[in-house]
Image (spheres, rainbow, N blue to C red):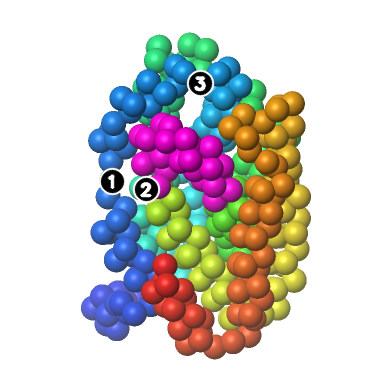
Amino acid sequence: MSHTFFATTTRGLNRDLPPMRLYEKAKKLGIWNPSDIDFTKDKQDWVKFTDEEKDLCLLLLSMFVAGEEAVTLDLLPLIQAIAQEGRIEEEMFLTTFLFEEAKHTDFFRRFMDDVAFPFPLGVGSDLTRYHGDNYRQLFYNSLPEALNALRSDPSPASQVRASVTYNMIVEGILAETGYHAFFTMLERNDLLPGLRKGIALLKQDESRHIAYGVYLLSRLMAEHPDEWDHLQMQMNMLLPSAIGVIGDAFARYDVVPFGLVEEDFVNYAMGQFSKRFERLEKARGVSLNEINRVAREADEVD
């Protein structure tokens, strides 16, 4: 498809749009290097862990590293769909997503290689045994199906499906609940400082991704309020699998390592789901100016 004009030589860039404000944050905060994180203390802590403590860490690591790789593999169609609509400000911010998701993949694999598996790549390090049916449903099937559907059908309905799956469920529920688990078990015991530092930086990146997802879905609800039922259906369809991932993790242990309590994490996940669901519900049919105002206010609070 040929270009008929360029925004930068006609209307210019709208730097007040929420995605451009997020882009400014990404340029400032998103440039960190997993190679610079020191795992010296992590190695000392790791050898003192019990087998079950190591098992729980490996379970979480296996879900994070595969999830980050999955998004790195599957994200391009969303960027392309937004680009085809000529939304240059949104696309500029979306270019940071792929870099950051790849960087997160690098970080978790680097920790595994340097701390958890200090021997040649592939020797004893296959962690797919931790991926249960609920996890596989989301990351092996739902995520690639939803994002790759945009290649042939970039309609608002397909964008809703893709963003709900990626931003609301994978990032907004599972990733955030996973961060919460890592910090709960490690922060209070002052363990694995390198891993904690990387996750704190990673969480900062993902918060921008989720903010954009809420913005995108809010904009779509403002422009296409008839898609609300589709959004609601997608969220409710995927929620049981997301909560199931949490249940599957806790079901592995008679006594859960680090004193973690399943109910705490289910409640946390449902709280993250509910607050974003309520915000999206309020976006139906309102003006784009109002969507932008609410997004800017949320950005200033963050």
The relative height of residue 92 versus residue 40 in the rendered view (above or below) is below
* Disc with the residue nearer the chain's start (1 vs 2): 1
Identify the amino acid type marked 3: Phe
- Closest to the camera, between mark 3 and mark 1, is 3
In the image: residue 191, left or right of residue 227: left
The relative height of residue 112 versus residue 177 in the rendered view (above or below) is above
Q: Give the residues in magenta.
A: 175-200
- Closest to the camera, between mark 3 and mark 2, is 3
On the image, which quarter does residue 283 sit in?
bottom right
Q: What residue does disc 2 label?
A: 201
* Quadrant containing the C terminus in the rendered view: bottom left
Residue 176 among magenta residues: yes
* Disc with the residue nearer the chain's start (3 vs 2): 3
The secondary structure that most of the magenta stretch takes on is helix
Identify the amino acid type marked 2: Leu
At a point 37% along the width and 63% down the height, the residue shown is 93
At a point 40% along the width and 54% down the height, the residue shown is 204
On the image, which quarter does residue 277 sit in?
bottom right
